[in-house]
Amino acid sequence: MKFSLRFNNDLPAREYIRYAAAAEQAGFQQFWVSDDLFLRSAPVILSAVALHTERIEIGSCILNPYTMHPAEIAMLAATLDELSGGRFNLGLSCGAEDFISGWLGMDFRQPRTLVVEAAHAINALTANQNAAMQGRALRWSEEAWLRFPSRRRVPIYLGAMSPRMLEEIGAIADGGLPLLFPPEHYSTILPYIQRGLRRSGRTLADIDLAACIWCSVSDDEAAARAMLADKIAYYGHAMSPLILDNLGLCQADFEPIRQRYHLQGDIAGARQLVSPRMLQIGIAGGSAALIERLERLAALGVRHMSFGPPLGPDILGAIETIGREVIPHFARRQLA
């Protein structure tokens, strides 16, 4: 079993150094940082983390080929892999249309095609090959190659929520970062990934599929629920119908919350509108509550558990709790 941590890029930059060091000490294998719009730069954060850790892999979750050109993504990936001594993983996907189109006014056409073509181009570039192509979304000249040696082809993990992007995890990626909201959503997304695996002639054993959950770990259950509610209030309206259908919800249910949070800036008011059903998107509570829900994932054959934001009112405490109680529990389970 593999274990990883995922962070939003909304914390003071230097704090990630402490959290990454604690994660390495606690037995996590990977440390991911998102690059959400208008927050701190994930590449800068990951550069600092690379210089203050030794073993833990680092990754971006996710970069998108709309706000950053695939050529620049390849440059960044090869550079961070060089800086970290071969520990960088590239999380890639299209991002949320609501943010890219709505906030930035950018054209959001052909998201799956653009991500797939970007992945092929980035793979070629970090493998020190020419990435010239005449695709549907990308058209590059014969001058498309890195002017410095990449130490290896950087692994690409695709982020996905929709059926078509989930299929591409199985078809083209080294790993996947499917968002499991709720955690039991794994059984829903797996058939799409397996369809892609059949296309590529591979099996689940050939990719690193991270079961990405949200959790808020604390013995103070009220505080844990409040932090998870804030995260749901921020992102809930941008989740795919495939996710919301599992909970008997739709995007319209989140519209009053979106208006409170994003238009009125009333975070406390938005939090109050998050229902118990919406809270099932993640896990809030102590280690026992976390283990209880994660046992269902382990029973489904999950081999990589990825713990994501908000993590808890005390992030260092949450990292230590997972390292002390949750990771050993599943390690013992594997040996049984």
Image (spheres, helix red, strand yellow):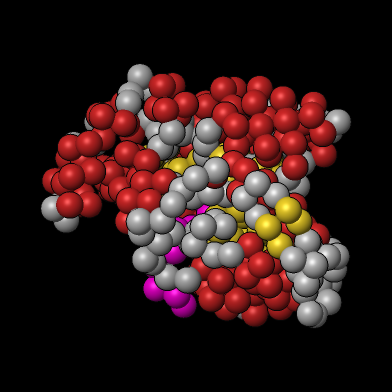
* Residue drawn where x is 66% and y is 22% of the image: 191
Q: Residue 149: horizontal and vertical position, in percent?
A: 83, 77
Quadrant containing the N terminus in the rendered view: top right
The range drawn in magenta is 4-15
Q: Is residue 73 above or below residue 187?
A: below
Answer left or right for 170 relative to 274.
Answer: right
Answer left or right for 309 relative to 28.
Answer: left
Q: Residue 84: horizontal and vertical position, in percent?
A: 71, 74
Q: Residue 101: horizontal and vertical position, in percent?
A: 38, 51
Q: Quadrant of residue 15?
A: bottom left
Total marks placed: 0
Let me know if residue 129 is in the magenta part: no
Is residue 61 visible in the rendered structure shown here?
no
Is residue 183 visible in the rendered structure shown here?
yes
* Residue drawn where x is 78% and y is 61% of the image: 132
Q: Residue 79: horizontal and vertical position, in percent?
A: 70, 75
Q: Is residue 61 above or below residue 158?
A: below
* Residue drawn where x is 80% and y is 80% of the image: 148
* Residue drawn where x is 49% and y is 62% of the image: 67
Q: Quadrant of residue 206?
A: top right
Which residue occupies the foreground of this view, 106 or 120? 106
Answer left or right for 2 relative to 200.
Answer: left
Quadrant containing the C terminus in the rendered view: top right
Q: Is residue 175 above or below residue 334?
A: below
Which residue occupies the foreground of this view, 282 or 115? 115
Q: Residue furthest top?
A: 248
Which residue occupies the foreground of this view, 243 or 143? 143
Q: Quadrant of residue 103?
A: bottom left
